[in-house]
Image: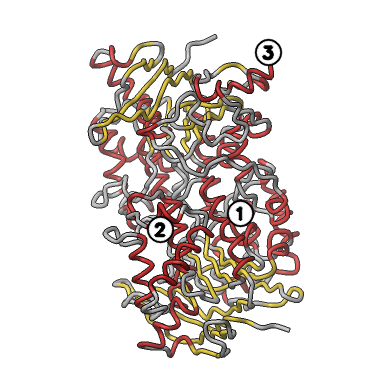
Amino acid sequence: MTEPLITLENVKRTFAVKGQTITAVDDINLAIPAGELMCLVGESGCGKTTTGKMIAGLLPTSSGRILYQGRDITKLGRSDWKKYRLGVQMVHQDPYASLNPIQTIFDILAAPLQHHRFTRSETETKQRIRQLLEIVDLTPPDDFLEKYPHQLSGGQRQRVSVARALTVLPEFIVADEAVSMVDVSIRISLLKMFTRLKDEMGVGVLLITHDLALAKYFAWEGRIGVMYLGRMVEIGPAREVVGHPQHPYTQVLLSAIPEADPDVTRAKQRIELRSMDMPSLLRLPSGCTFHPRCPVFAGEVCERVIPLLEKAKWGSEVACHLVHADES
Amino acid sequence: MPDPILSVRDLSIIYQARRGQVQALRKISFDVERGESVALIGESGSGKTTVGLGLMRLLPTTARIIGGSVVYRRQGNGLNPAGRETDVLSLNGGNLRQFRWRECAMVFQSALNALNPVLRVSEHFADTARAHGYLSGQQAALRERSLKLLSMVRLDPDRVWRSFPHELSGGMRQRVLIALALLLEPQLLILDEPTTALDILTQRNIMDVLKELRSKLGFSMLFISHDLALAAELADRVATVYAGKIIEIGDVRTIFRNPYHPYTIGLIKAVPTLTSDRSALVSVPGSPPDLIQLPTGCKFHPRCPLASERCISEEPALTEVKTGHQVACWHWPDSPQALKSYQAELG
């Protein structure tokens, strides 16, 4: 087996909030091979964005290690650190906030090209920018070079953000809710563009989203990881996580999603939670953090013991006592 | 026998911008029947929020209503037994205040900002009641009704009543807003993107709450959303809005099963769902039109694979496909078929 591009080993991240410590991400283990399209899903506050930021090197871990091409990123020398930071790029959620409003698209894309010496002359820069704009379907490129972000639609801005990430020839892109602020009619074309980056340039993408239906579409060939209160509760091949969800939380999420068909959606079987209230990160429940809400709560073991992410059916890994009790 | 609680006719609203006039609504017409739930679906910039603000007469000062009419027909109820017809656009002063909240209430987009951060939930209820002259001097009755509404939206009334907005989660705030909207027993509830920006389990909860409230209280509902699944779940009738006009309207099953407008067809195909066939998903090409410089003819023609000469020069009006289903497209009799062969050609 080839070495994963990015490896997370027991990664934990805490934040100090008003003198107290909250654990945003706890004990995440993950190996991402080069060129994988993967999705991380979960509700707000589950730690998916924090995980993405740590992968992109924008946030240090509190404990645990992140390896890039097998090497601990905290031990990289200056030039290797730079290689890693260029190799893993991030596309942020809000295309209205992530582009400088007083720079033209040309300026926005030229800055990283010139700063990191990917291009040596004005002509070369212009030529490369035209190429990049074509890759992200902003055609004809010359129509966009002199435009400012405010002259573009949300979808077009998000394409510029992706083009900017591509200027430095990354191997991996962390896309944090990259399509959720874009109109529904063009989300699919943005996702298809990411898929094409993988097919044509081998760029892997970690898409962070709260939308499981979108995750299924995007990570079809790859994996979906489901997070709850900082922990990975289920991870496996996208089709299986959606088709055969095993963790009760994944099952509840899937049953809650409305379908764009009046008969299907109204006939859908819902799984009710025992409690609607999301526990506070300041006072995480003991044992399995999902136990106060879990529809199949099984008593003491769930309250006391933190379930570990272990191999289950369908090629998935699941962190639930009941799933593993069934098997043994 | 139709008995609309709300009739909107040829409503046109513009915004004055530095670059020119934004044509937010262009002669939009629709009815909401008594007890019915109607969804207006469309993308950002389609004018759907302007419909809600226009109906509540809450437009910003840069907006102008340049034509059309809005008629609201109240039914006698316990509070006020007289049925009455109201010309909403001519209301002012006290009458307008009476209309808002007593007759027609709105749940605004972004629940996070719609509550006053320095007021407790109890004070929001008291304020709303005072502003609209409801149950004045009957503190106990007001409190009782408020607490009942809060438990109807599945909140713990005793806890929430004394809370400040920042002590509540997004979903809880949204439910407080829904309870607040229902305080004066309005007959029509307008909801602008009621579940956008909420987590999926919270969305589910809000949808269930709305369904339950509607069956208990029997109000009519107009909701505005870009979320097709929400419409599939909650609406009796669905209208697709594009460039300030309704381009297709019909009952919810017809719109999702047999849509005729290429834009409606495109929107439905563009939304991934858990059960949808992955290969059938396609984006609608292009982006929404500039409302200051609208395209000629059919406003969808620059994005439409079926666009012909006539689409470029003449704007189609809503035509009846069958009773209760109307579409504004020159190609409607064969649009579904033509789109299919177009897709097949693309491979």
Residue picked out by circle 2: B110
Q: Which residue is mark 1?
A: B229
Mark 3 or mark 1, whichever is nearer to me? 3
The residue furthest top is A1
Please tell me which residue lies in front, B25 or A128: B25
In front here: A170 or B246?
A: B246
Query: Which amino acid lies under the numbered mark 1 shown in the image of this protein?
Result: Ala
Chain at tag 3 = A
Q: Residue furthest front?
A: B140
Q: Position of residue B75 (x, y in %)?
A: 59, 84
Q: Pointer 2: residues within 10 angstroms few (<14), some, or many (20+)?
A: some
Indicate the quadrant where residue B261 lies.
bottom right
Of the two numbered discs 3 and 2 in the rendering, the one whose residue sits closer to the viewer: 3
The type of residue carrying mark 3 is Ser
Q: Secondary structure at mark 2?
A: loop
x%, y% of residue A308? 52, 18
Q: Nearer the viewer, residue B28 or B228?
A: B228
Residue B47 visible to an observer of this rendering: no
User: Residue A328, labelled with which disc?
Assistant: 3
**Colour scheme of the rendered structure:** secondary structure
